[in-house]
Amino acid sequence: MRRFRVARLRSFRPSIPSRQALSLWRADVTASLVVFLVAVPLCVGVAVASGVPAELGLVTGIVGGLFTGLLPGSSLQVSGPAAGLTVLVYEAVQEYGLGTLGALVLIAGVLQLAMGALRLGRWFRAISVAVVQGMLAGIGLVLIAGQLYALADAKAPGSGPANLGGLPKLAADTAGSGAALAALAVGAGTIVLLVVWPKWRRAARVVPAPLVAVALSTAVVCVLDLPVARVEVAGLLEVVQPPGGADFLRLTEAGAVAGALGTVLAFTLIASAESLFSAAAVDRLHDGPRTDYDKELMAQGAGNTVCGLLGALPMTAVIVRSAANVQAGARTKASRVLHGVWLLVFAVAFPAALGVVPVAALAGVLVHAGGKLLPVKQWRPLWREHRGEAVVLAATAVAIVATNMFEGVLLGLLMAVAKSAWETSHVHLEIVGLDEPAAPATGDTTAGDATANCGTGAPGPRRPIRVRALGHATFLRLPKLLDQLEALPEDREIELDLSGLRHLDHACAAALGSWEEQRRGPDGTNRQKTPSIAP
């Protein structure tokens, strides 16, 4: 009887973990549907804004779910096409052609794999936050400037400065065109819905704002039959074009190597930084396993390699989809894999659904996304507390708008390094004895001449001025350091103590040695009798 009862108890034990597994599975399925609904308009909108077929955005989202979603690294963040790379992809497609996009993305993916294998993922956390915020702000400004043209069904001139300079003409042309005004109304309505819908929290948890905004805008356009541009549909299999040898050769042509190299490095740097920063942000949203940055970098590299082989858009981990995944209750990586399944089903079974979506609605989604990239709330406290960081942020953003992504980020990194070097190279001189009065006059007290010299002797010699240097003496502080030393009295002896310096570079050492030689002088009046004490 006891044996029978023990057997019955053992038979019921597996039911407990099975219930937990069912609960996890149910949460992941629900979360995957939410992420899918968020991802569809973003994938299509990023592709259209990048100047490529809309289906390529879905391809990247599918790879991010079905392939990258299975790899180790971060368990809950979701990968796909990102608005942060839209401007760079558009410029690359315009310069090299759509066929070479896959080659560029493939090379960037291989570089990410190599960096992950070399365990460089954690070093991306050393990038200045001001540079990252400036990069995102610059991307947001360029994205908004370009998508304002799409809001009115107009074609953007191309570069960031040209887009900004053409806004007055765009406003004049839109005011005189009924079709442009209709498209602008659709785009503006989409932006309003994106802002208002999340305030209705109960409804926003069920249906995400991007889907509601695009769906309602599409319904209005269809019902009123407005004369606005729609998304062009080509078919999933038709747009997948793996890069060939001719595409790689095109990147090696004379005059194209430097630009192609800069584009690849920009893809690699921005995609890696955005993914790893997103992973750090997602880790703060849940209590699950933490991200392994090196493995996550390799996962992103593997995903971009596959996207490159398919000729699709580059991939990053995106905080918008990742946050939606966590907030929807995802527990494991199954949610992001399933979201890729739903994207694949949608792309295969309902491709014609994209053909009714107005371009202005997608432009509204991207204008709203670009606005979120601007650090409006963080700017004022950053300016009050860390003014140098604020300057780096603003300079990076302006440089990206004025030049391009790679050069702007490079300038921001150089400014961050220069700022850090300036702030850490503090040197301070402690000067003792500068205001010391002269010693009392001493007369000659020898016999027979005491009264003659009493009170008529010259002032006694002063003690040397002691100068002690503290801090980090680098070439950045050398002008100020020499100004302070050269302002010391020339008729006094100087004792220079350098033992308090934590760092003395070659430029400062050479300049101080030259100053000592000048102080000694050939006539001996400015001689420094006591040598300096080296650190």
Image (cartoon, helix red, strand yellow):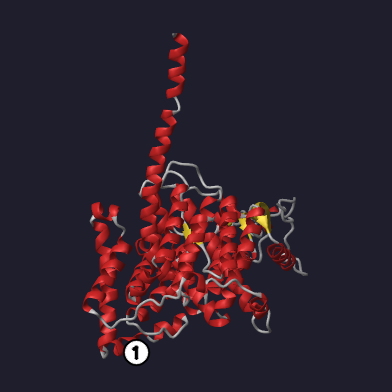
The correct choice, above or below, for 466 with respect to 287 in the image is below
Query: From where the camera sits, is residue 391 visible?
Result: no
Check the image and report above or below for 472 versus 217.
above
What residue is drawn where x is 46% and y is 20%? Answer: 10
For the view shown, which residue lies furthest in the right direction?
Answer: 522
Residue beneath the point at 34% across and 89% down? 169
Name the spot of residue 461 as percent of width and height, x first: 67, 56
Is any atom of residue 340 visible in this view?
Answer: yes
Q: Position of residue 357 (x, y in %)?
A: 33, 73
Front residue of 357/495: it is 357
* Image coordinates for residue 505, horizontal then vertical, percent: 69, 60
Query: Mark 1 — residue?
Result: 169
Q: Quadrant of residue 227?
A: bottom left
The residue at 44%/68% (across/down) is: 83
What element does badge 1 sit on? helix
Q: Left or right: where does residue 448 sit relative to residue 70?
A: right
Q: Toward the viewer: 318 or 58?
A: 58
User: On the image, which quarter does residue 268 sit in?
Assistant: bottom right
Q: Nearer the viewer, residue 314 or 144?
A: 314
Amino acid type of the residue tagged 1 in the rendering: Lys
Please identify the quadrant where the N terminus is shown.
top left
Q: How crowded is the residue under tag 1: few (<14 C-alpha within 10 Å), some, or many (20+)?
A: few
Name the residue nearer the viewer: 225 or 190.
225
* Residue 359 place in picture, x, y as percent: 35, 76
Q: How many marks?
A: 1
* Image height of 16 relative to 77, above or below: above
Looking at the image, residue 89 sits to the left or right of residue 205; the answer is right
In which image quadrant can residue 523 be found? bottom right
**Is 523 placed left or right of 160 in the picture?**
right
